[in-house]
Image (cartoon, rainbow, N blue to C red):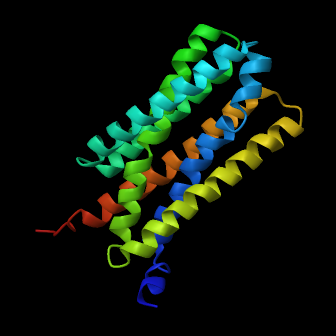
Amino acid sequence: MAELRVLRRGPVLGALALTVVGSSAMFTVFTYIVPILRDATHASFAFVTAMLVTYGVGLTIGNWLGGKFADHSVDRTLIVTLASLSAVLVAFAALMPHAGISAVLIFLWGVASFALVPPLQVRVMTAAADAPNLASAMNIGAFNLGNALGAALGGFVIAKGLGYPMVSLAGAATSAVGLLIVITGTLRATGRDRPAHCPS
């Protein structure tokens, strides 16, 4: 019951919501990467397979980098990563017909996607330090919720006939929302920590 009460705290709910947004930004596009590569990039089956491996390598490197930089600053790591993710997805939307450039962008997209994971986890665990077990489990649930919402968003864009580039732009916009949340929270925290001015 004590751990459940922790989940009612604003900072904990905010951290979990950010995990949902970050995960959604990733899965809005990744859910449809095979048809994107097949229909927009006109890639062969072998190229699609190679890109899935490339993306996986990017995820591994990103996870390591995210943990390394989160040790120094969680918020700064989130800001840089979310901004990078938005930029990569915008570039992918414009350049997905070009196989060579798409390969580079898919790798960078993988790096940015999973560089998010360690700072998001740290953010949740810090906000719910006295309920670590439940907080960790809830964060995984939030990640999976973002997975579902991102897939639904991408599917909605496709169902509306807006095209695969718009799917990538939808992912970029979702990442930008997460970036705005982090920047706003950081500015508010800075304002609270600033000492009050004492008139002489």
Question: Which quarter of the picture shows residue 136?
Answer: bottom left
The foreground one among 47 and 31 is: 47
Question: Which quarter of the picture shows residue 99?
Answer: top right
Instruction: Give the left or right position of residue 162, taking residue 59 as reference.
Output: right
Question: Among all residues in the image, which is located at the extreme bottom?
Answer: 1
- At which x and y percent is residue 175? 56, 42
Q: Is residue 134 visible?
A: yes
| On screen, residue 4 above or below 113 | below
The foreground one among 124 and 90 is: 124
Question: How many numbered marks appear?
Answer: 0
| On screen, residue 162 above or below 189 | above
| On screen, residue 19 above or below 83 | below
Instruction: Give the left or right position of residue 108, taking residue 168 as reference.
Output: left
Residue shown at 46%/63% (left/top)? 15
Residue shown at 39%/40% (left/top)? 63
- At which x and y percent is residue 93? 67, 23
Instruction: Give the left or right position of residue 94, taking residue 112 as reference.
Output: right
Residue shown at 68%/41% (left/top)? 28
| Quadrant into which the C terminus falls | bottom left
Q: Is residue 165 visible?
A: no
Residue shown at 27%/42% (left/top)? 68
- At which x and y percent is residue 66? 35, 42
